Image: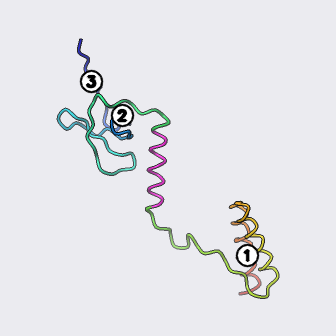
Amino acid sequence: MRTEPATYEPGAVLYDTAAARVGEYRGRSGARLMLRPLGGGREWEAEPAALRPATDRERLGASLRAANDRTLATPPAPGGWERPPLPVPGCDACAWLADRREAARAAFDHSAVTDANVLLRQHQRKEHE
């Protein structure tokens, strides 16, 4: 008994077991199906027998990888990724905030590092400009 291969709607998210990749179904190319990575990129051909609908976990993983790739490929906006402020020499408040920032950095407390940077910038605008 012969079974018909599954038919998929364009846009269906499939897992290619032969390539171990998740892709979006784009169409047919002869007997093979065309898939494209979820974040975009070069299409590839897959045998219909090697395809199945992607699980939620596979779909989420592929979507996260695509989002991370887009983020890393996008240059920062003006004003983004600024250098941390430097303490003004001789200012006790600047030195205290810089020490607080370094202690937070050593403890891997990124939120406290950001807080210290914000407070140091505010202090410098108020007292040193």
Measuring from the top left, give residue 99's x and y in whole percent: 77, 73
**Within-10-Å neighbours for mark 1: few <14, some 14–19, many 20+:** many
Secondary structure mostly seen in magenta is helix
Q: Residue at x 49, y 41 (%)?
A: 60
| Rendered view: 85 above or below 50 | below
Asked whether 126 or 32 is in front, the reply is 32
Mark 1 to mark 3: distance in Å? Answer: 64 Å
Mark 2 to mark 1: distance in Å? Answer: 53 Å
Asked whether 102 or 5 is in front, the reply is 102
Going from the N terminus, do you reach mark 3 or mark 2 first?
Answer: 3
Disc number at residue 5?
Answer: 3
Going from the N terminus, do you reach mark 1 or mark 3 first?
Answer: 3
Q: Is residue 74 magenta?
A: no
Measuring from the top left, give residue 58's x and y in whole percent: 46, 37
Three-letter code for the amino acid on which mark 2 is drawn: Thr
Asked whether 70 or 109 is in front, the reply is 109
Query: Residue at the left extreme?
Result: 30
User: Which portion, as a residue range, is magenta?
Assistant: 59-72
Q: Secondary structure at mark 1?
A: helix
Left or right relative to 14: residue 67: right
Q: Mark 1 or mark 3: which is in front?
A: 3
Q: Which residue is mark 2?
A: 17
Query: Residue at the top extreme?
Result: 1
Q: Which residue is mark 1?
A: 120
Q: Quadrant of residue 49?
A: top left
Q: Residue at x 38, y 36 (%)?
A: 13
